[in-house]
Amino acid sequence: METVRVAAVQMDVKLGDREGNLRAILDRIDTAAGAGARLVVFPECALSGYVFESRDEAMSAAEEIPGPSLGAIGARCAERDVFAVVGLLERDGERLFNACAMVGPKGVIASYRKNHLPFLGVDRFVDPGDRPFEVVEAAGLRLGMHICYDGSFPESGRVMTLLGAEVLLWPTNWPTRAEPTAEHFPIVRAMENAVYVMAVNRVGSERGFPFIGHSSIVDPNGQVLARGDGECEQILMAEIDPELARRKKIIRVPGLHEIDRIADRRPEYYGPIVSTLRS
């Protein structure tokens, strides 16, 4: 099977400036598509910004899915024949979610609402995600979406892997002090699930919170295919071979050293992982 060229857009985002952020996103889609990308992934809350100080302020930067911004992104995806994953704040009646949407030439394909919420930025005010993890096919790949803090819980990536994901898409807003997470977690998640990981962080700062960049694209063996720096806007490019993510059995020395981190699981002993904590 042919490889698929993907792009991770490490960009600055302006708080509350949905129109300006949308223009930047459309520009990056053009640039990435011009370089041959079929899938373009943006950071968490790329349309809205992140460090809001109240639910009302955040709600003013939110929109429905589908909505006008995603409509414009869909039109650009149709022009360029690409797919994009964009972080945004989703308004659903009186509810508010930290979400990401997958958009293609025919419009919105799927969306995800962040399940794990840290006490930070807009996540202090949004509603917890109310949908299970899922896998969606686009650009010739089987894709699973989760957002920032979700990836701190290995169960998130494992569930999507068991559902058939070949690539874990991971829009983030990692601030200062999350450097170890940016450096190690994408590699670990890729290796433990034998999948590709696209961890797409932002740069710049909002209300005294600097964001650290260091986006990365990692292959199923834990090899870093592309990594961003800590300050600059960049578009990281890599080739993804879905067949590599489908071969879960790793043969290091035939007949002597062979592992399969999916087939070798013992789920009958994992009950406490899905048990509700008692105080």
Image (cartoon, rainbow, N blue to C red):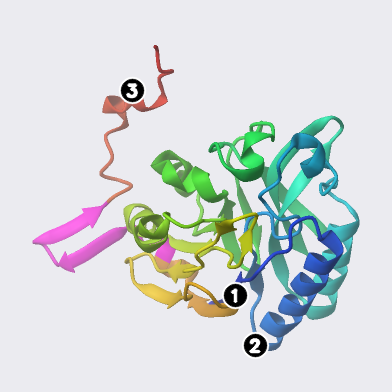
- The Cα atoms of the two marked residues, 2 and 3, are separated by 46 Å
Q: Is residue 199 above or below residue 277?
A: below
| Residue labelled with disc 1 | 7
**Residue 131 image offset from top left, x and y in percent:** 65, 34
Q: Residue furthest bottom?
A: 35
In this picture, residue 31 sits left or right of residue 167: right
Q: What type is the residue that disc 1 sits on?
A: Ala
Report helix, strand or loop for mark 2: loop
| Residue labelled with disc 2 | 35
| Residue labelled with disc 3 | 272
Report helix, strand or loop for mark 1: strand
Is residue 63 rendered magenta in the image? no
Q: Is residue 31 above or below residue 148?
A: below
Image quadrant where residue 128 sits: top right
In the rendered structure, are the residues bearing label 1 and label 2 in contact, judged by CB atoms less than 8 Å apart?
yes
Q: Residue at x 39, y 55 (%)?
A: 181
